[in-house]
Image (spheres, rainbow, N blue to C red):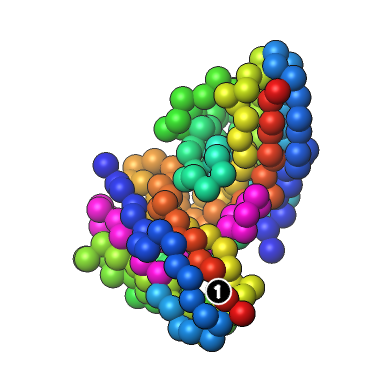
Amino acid sequence: KQEVTQIPAALSVPEGENLVLNCSFTDSAIYNLQWFRQDPGKGLTSLLLIQSSQREQTSGRLNASLDKSSGRSTLYIAASQPGDSATYLCAVPTSGTYKYIFGTGTRLKVLA
Amino acid sequence: EADIYQTPRYLVIGTGKKITLECSQTMGHDKMYWYQQDPGMELHLIHYSYGVNSTEKGDLSSESTVSRIRTEHFPLTLESARPSHTSQYLCASSPLGRGGYNEQFFGPGTRLTVL
């Protein structure tokens, strides 16, 4: 059964720092991996989708990498800003179904 | 930007009432999902659909029911609301795509409080 873990659970950094969020999954047979951002009380906003054939994807200050063999993905945020404060979630589809498994999330706070 | 809508955004209701949470998307996506999320907690899938007239229960047992009569519409109904149903309900959709797996888009959520 696929399990998705995110470390750290919470992170507080000063503005301007580069930071890395981690996502681990136990079953490497995934089709893709998606990173989301969630602000308190709101829905999820899609940040990046990495297909299984890709090693990384970039969008602005965000860069996500995928290493299927080791069951890991990282989300790199460059030059962090207070507006980046949110919870970041990763999700993978489960094999043979149309369902997705979500990680427990990393709650990020960027201090001005 | 994803065009997926949920109404109402906030709902406070008394125990025993019947409620329907609406979810609509204008992207023609085949797959739609309902998740339940308590504050600061993880998402739990409660229902999903991969097309018209198809609905499946998710991983978290729920007393709610869903229907999928039209591609763009996936309402969730609680026949008799209870305080234990107090939570945030998130709707999502995704195109079927190659291999069956594709990007998920989420609505803004409905925060339900049952008194």
Compared with A103, B89 (above or below) is above
Which is more toward the observer, A24 or B106?
A24
Q: Residue placed at 43% from the left, 78% from the top?
A: A19
Q: Is residue B10 magenta?
A: no
Compared with B16, B42 (above or below) is below
Q: Residue placed at 56% from the left, 44% from the top?
A: B39
- Binning the other alpha carbons within 10 Å of mark 1 as few (below 14), some (14 to 19) or many (20 upward) gives some
Q: Is residue A67 left or right of residue A47?
A: left
Assign the C terminus of chain A to one quadrant of the image.
Answer: bottom right
Determine the chain carrying the residue at label 1: A
Residue B79 rendering spot, x and y as whole percentages: 67, 16
Residue B40 rendering spot, x and y as whole percentages: 52, 48
Q: Quadrant of residue A29?
A: bottom left
Count every numbered label the image shows and give the total: 1
Which is more toward the observer, B33 or A53?
B33
- One can see residue A52 in this view: no
Q: Is residue B56 left or right of residue B115?
A: left
- Name the residue type under label 1: Val
Q: Which residues are magenta?
A: A21-44
Q: Is residue A37 magenta?
A: yes
Q: Residue placed at 33% from the left, 55% from the top?
A: A5
Residue furthest left in the image: A69
Q: Is residue B11 left or right of residue B36?
A: right
Element at label 1: strand
Q: Residue placed at 56% from the left, 50% from the top?
A: B94
Q: Quadrant of residue B2?
A: bottom right
Residue B47 rendering spot, x and y as whole percentages: 53, 32
Which is more toward the observer, B11 or B67?
B11
Q: Quadrant of residue B6?
A: top right
Q: Label 1, on which residue? A: A110
Compared with A14, B19 (above or below) is above
